[in-house]
Image (tube, rainbow, N blue to C red):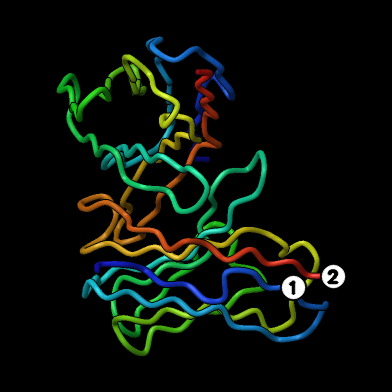
């Protein structure tokens, strides 16, 4: 059975701190790993990772994938209150045309001013 | 503006009364999908569609139906809703399948079945 496990479940830090969110997975026929940010409503796309060791960066956020150890991390530096959200990790697989995307349960990040 | 539009945003209904949640996208995306989000369980896929007239089951399809008669629309139908279908539902679309292009989500429909 496919599994995507995120840790920690919840994290509370002060503004300006750096945080690292983790996502480990067990999925056959891996295609890509995606990170989403969910505030009050719809998840919004952050990163798509397909290759090991290549860091993707967007402002204060960065992410990297390790396909050998089957995990990814999402780093946020100099956190701001606007970073408070649930961060979702999802892994995509393809098996003879049967497309599947499995989400983790998310990490709830709270930034205290 | 490129978007995925779901309606209604909130819906309270009674057990057994058929309902439809509509989903429409204006980005000419081929791939569309429905998810439900429950505390502690994350987002789970209900049904997806790779293109017009092509639909397939996700992880939790029981009690739901979908159709894809046109590229832009992908309605979710609950023929006989039950309380265990109380959840937050998201429709999503992507250009050519989510492993090549990211999903764009609608703003969600919060359904309560009493």
User: Looking at the image, is mark 1 or mark 2 earlier in the sequence?
Assistant: 1
Q: Which chain is mark 1 on?
A: B
Image depth: mark 1 or mark 2 in front? 1
In the figure, is residue B54 to the left or right of B8?
left
**Residue at position x 40%, y 75% in the image:** B55
Residue under numbered circle 1:
B12
Q: Circle 2 — which element?
A: loop
- Front residue (pair B78, A56): A56
B102 over A71 or under it: above or below: below
**Residue at position x 27%, y 25% in the image:** A61
> Do the CB atoms of the residues marked 1 and 2 lie less than 8 Å apart?
yes
In the figure, is residue B25 to the left or right of B88?
left
On the same chain, marks 1 and 2? The answer is: yes
Q: Which chain is mark 2 on?
A: B
Which quarter of the figure has residue A65? top left
Residue A104 on image: x %, y % = 50, 37
| Residue A63 visible to an observer of this rendering | no
Which quarter of the figure has residue B97? bottom left
* Dot 1 crowding, Cα within 10 Å, few <14, some 14–19, many 20+: few
B15 over A61 or under it: above or below: below
* Dot 2 crowding, Cα within 10 Å, few <14, some 14–19, many 20+: some
Residue B20 on image: x %, y % = 59, 83
- Front residue (pair B56, B43): B43
Q: Circle 1 — which element?
A: strand
């Amino acid at each position: 059975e496919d599994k995507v496990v995120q840790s920690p479940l919840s994290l509370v830090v002060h503004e300006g701190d750096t945080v690292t969110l983790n996502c480990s997975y067990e999925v056959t026929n891996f295609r890509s790993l995606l990170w989403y940010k969910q505030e009050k409503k719809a998840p919004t796309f952050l990163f798509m990772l397909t290759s090991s060791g290549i860091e993707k960066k967007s402002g204060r956020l960065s992410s990297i994938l390790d396909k050998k150890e089957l995990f990814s991390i999402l780093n946020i530096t100099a956190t701001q209150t606007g970073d408070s959200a649930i961060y979702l990790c999802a892994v995509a697989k393809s098996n003879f045309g049967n497309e599947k995307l499995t989400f983790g349960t998310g990490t709830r990040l709270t930034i205290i001013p | 503006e490129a978007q995925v539009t779901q309606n209604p945003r909130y819906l309270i209904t009674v057990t057994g009364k058929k309902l439809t949640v509509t989903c429409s996208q204006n980005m000419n995306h081929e791939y569309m999908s429905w998810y439900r989000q429950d505390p502690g369980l994350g987002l789970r896929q209900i049904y997806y569609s790779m293109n017009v007239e092509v639909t397939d089951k996700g992880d939790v399809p029981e009690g739901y139906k979908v159709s894809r008669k046109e590229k832009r629309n992908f309605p979710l139908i609950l023929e006989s809703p039950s309380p265990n279908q109380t959840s937050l539902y998201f429709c999503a679309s992507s250009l050519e399948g989510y492993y090549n292009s990211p999903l764009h989500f609608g703003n969600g429909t919060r359904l309560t079945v009493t």
